[in-house]
Amino acid sequence: MIKHDVVIVGSGLAGMRAALEVCKDLDVAILSKVYPSRSHSGAAQGGIAASLGNSEPDSWEEHLYDTVKGGDFLNDQDAAEEYVKAAPRVIYELEHFGCVFSRTPDGKIAQRSFGGHSKPRACFSADRTGHAILHALHEQILKRSKSIKIYSEWYMHSLILDGDRCNGIVVSDIRTGAIEVMQARSVIFGTGGYGRVFNITSNAFASTADGIMAAYRAGIPIEDAEFVQYHPSGLYRQGILFSEAARGEGGYLLNGKGERFMETYAPSRMELAPRDIVARAEQSEMDAGRGVDEKDIIHLDLRHLGEARIMERLPQIRQLGIDFIGVDCVKDPLPIQPTAHYSMGGIPTDKFGQVIRDADGTRVNGFFAAGECACVSVHGANRLGTNSLLEAVVFGERAGRAALEYVKTVGHAPVNESHEKTKVLERFEGIFQRDGKESYNDIRKEMKTIMTEKCSVFRDEEQLKVCIDTIKKLQERYKNGKITDKGKLFNTEIYEILELGNMLGMAEIIANGALNRKESRGGHYRTDYPKRDDENFLKHSLTYKTDEGMEIRYKPVVITKHQPAERTY
């Protein structure tokens, strides 16, 4: 049995920031499916939000209002307030950690405009902001190697819970196949989102809902899973992200007629409306036959910015276009479409990263979560661009600090190592012994297709019922799949099968939540219920696993300063 004081699952911004907080006095482990610098946080391009006021006067109060309005008033405003207040300190701290931000001519941290923000508050490092922050934190982790041990290319299978206390996790070394128990006084999840359940997504291959589903199987509900953000500018058919920074720098969105169509949908903000509004506008244009070449294509036009500005502010976007489709954005527009991007829902936590299991705030002691896998609900029903990196760092720090304080009060609890390992071994052997005829690759493709076709930008009851029925059939076919590699050493196939199982479960949770929420709010839009319904649905959904199937319960939204109002841009 492997023993640490604190085990952190996930090596993105949330996980690494938590590690820096707890390693001061404790023995800490970071476990990750990938090498830390390959974590999905590195894919964030455009910036991290803070009311520094370096371009024009700004305040945390304005940042809060923009965030709450952008989230269609489903945000928990107490958590959101503390989060935006912390933002300026976080930026300066990251700079001291070694993150190199782009600068203004007078040497201040540069800030640009982003969708839904009323002021330029995106602090950026060209169009590689997540990459810059990730590497800065990774360097800090390596400096503390005496107290932080990194387990790269290890897979987390399950939580070890005893009543309302978490005592560790069950893991395996991908390289050797060895299954181990990691005993810990505290566990922190920073495992990311679940975008890979969709066919067209900006998410890394590792975003397969592993952490969220481990919590779900352990009896912890999933909050607001129906709210999935579609980013307006994913590369056509591939989903590779062209950052919102492109629109923040002044890029245009054009339909097949060459029209800047956002004037119809958000006349005051145009291309810099919140992402849910822009994604629906794009989809509406394409559905009306006004896509480029009558296809599901919108053009992102940067040509008017000029080569010098593009190379200064958007060099990666230019290179992505050249590398993947042979299009140079200096000379030609980029073909884009709405792309599954971010999960507003996740494992319920309080504003300190403490995992809770119900509407009463009952704690799962020793279990914390932060980043995209968690739902502290600072984003509500729709996240504003640049707020995700901020969330990961702020609540990674908070979860780490809360775990540190908790661990001071407890020792290691007894763990039945044999029992915990046996459960996972039986799951492995069950997959190895299947002699079915179903192709896991086919099941994966069909899941992604049905989720993209029936549970995406626009939804309705008929499509969602078809989606749920199809997912359930795929879950049954999954039980009759056939593995081709039965070896132990670096058997990536078995882990892809486990990930597929997690994604199938997550897909059902998303679609079921979407069917249950009979309104339109933020990233969730029902064509059969096109209006927001505060009377019946100004509340968070909690999806529980029961013996009879899924059960949805609710908890109230925390409203402090801003009462729900009509959302116009």
Image (cartoon, rainbow, N blue to C red):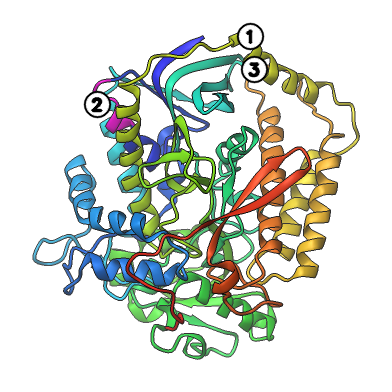
Q: Is residue 185 above or below residue 108?
A: above
With 402 as the anchor, is 7 left or right in this view? Answer: right
- Figure quadrant of residue 181: top right
Q: Position of residue 94 (x, y in %)?
A: 23, 46
Q: Is residue 479 visible?
A: yes
Q: Position of residue 444 (x, y in %)?
A: 74, 46
Q: Is residue 340 above or below residue 25?
A: below
Query: Label 1 neighbourhood size at 10 Å, few (<14), some (14-19), many (20+)?
Result: few
Element on which disc 1 rests: helix
Is label 2 or label 3 in front? 2
Q: Of 419 and 197, which appears nearest the observer?
A: 419
Q: Mark 2: which amino acid?
A: Lys
The residue indicated by pointer 1 is 418
- What distance separates the C-alpha of mark 1 from that of mark 2? 36 Å
Is label 1 or label 3 in front? 1
Tell me the tag on residue 143.
2
Tell me the tag on residue 489.
3
Q: Is residue 315 above or below residue 90?
A: below
Q: Which residues are magenta?
A: 19-25
Q: Is residue 248 above or below residue 42?
A: below
